Structure formats: C-alpha cells, structure tokens
Image (cartoon, rainbow, N blue to C red):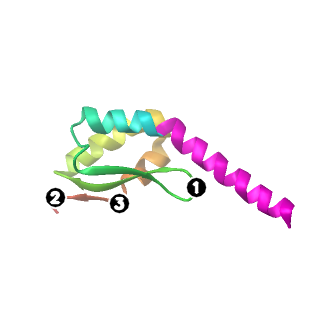
Amino acid sequence: MCFVAGGILAEQQCYQRYFSEREQSVLEIVGRMQLSQSIQVRRDSKGRVVLLGLVDSKDLKVKLTAELIPIVGKRDANHAVISLDVKDE
C-alpha cells in the first residue's frame, strides 16, 4: 500500500515541477501582453498550464496561443487557452 501511495505522490510532484518550470515564462507572456488583470494562470491535474479569464478578441486568443507554443508545445498551448472566454463572442 505504501508503495502505491509513494508512486502517486511522486507523480504529483513531477506534475508540479513540470508546471513550475513553465509558470514563470507564461506569466511573463501574460504580463507583456497586458493581460495579467484579466487572466489567471493555473495548472490542471497533469501539471499543464491552464489560463482562465477573458480576452478582448479571438485574434488576441490566437496570438496568445502562438506565444505559448515555444514554452509548452502546440498541443499544450491549445489546451492552455481552451477555457479562455472571448469578450466579442
């Protein structure tokens, strides 16, 4: 039983480390794009970045996704912005 619990704990620590390694870069992008007042940076259960909040336009959401790709990869960048709402829609 302890072996299983230890494995789960180690996995969660790995997810947290994965997120922490990317969080600062994502926060810098959000700040540079002047979105820090409207977007929160969170992590999901697998340690991936998730952005929550509101952006002004679909174009801005696409631009933010493109900025995230070099940091988290294309698949995770698309995952990160999926919960963002667009003001115009």
Q: Magenta segment: does it hold 85?
A: no
Relative side of 1 to 8, left or right: right
Magenta segment main secondary structure: helix
Considering the numbered disc 3 on the image, is that residue within a helix, a strand or a loop? Answer: loop
Q: Which residue is mark 3?
A: 83
Q: How many marks?
A: 3
Q: Does the CB distance between marks 3 and 1 fall below 8 Å?
A: no
Q: Which residue is mark 1?
A: 46
List x then y, in percent, for residue 12: 65, 54
Q: Which residue is mark 2?
A: 87
Look at label 3 and name its amino acid. Ser
For the point 52% across and 40% down, the residue is 20
List x then y, in percent, for residue 22: 49, 38
**Callout 1 environment at 10 Å: few (<14), some (14 to 19), or many (20+)?**
few
Q: Which residues are magenta?
A: 1-22
Considering the numbered disc 2 on the image, is that residue within a helix, a strand or a loop? Answer: loop
Q: How far apart in space, not on screen, are marks 2 and 3 (Cα)?
A: 13 Å
Name the residue nearer the viewer: 53 or 80. 53
List x then y, in percent, for residue 24: 43, 35
**Callout 3 environment at 10 Å: few (<14), some (14 to 19), or many (20+)?**
few
**Does residue 89 lie above or below 60 as drawn?**
below
Q: How far apart in space, not on screen, are marks 1 and 2 (Cα)?
A: 28 Å
**Does residue 58 lie above or below 27 as drawn?**
below
Considering the numbered disc 1 on the image, is that residue within a helix, a strand or a loop? Answer: loop
For the point 46% across and 43% down, the residue is 74
**Does residue 42 lie above or below 30 as drawn?**
below
List x then y, in percent, for residue 76: 48, 48
**Callout 2 environment at 10 Å: few (<14), some (14 to 19), or many (20+)?**
few
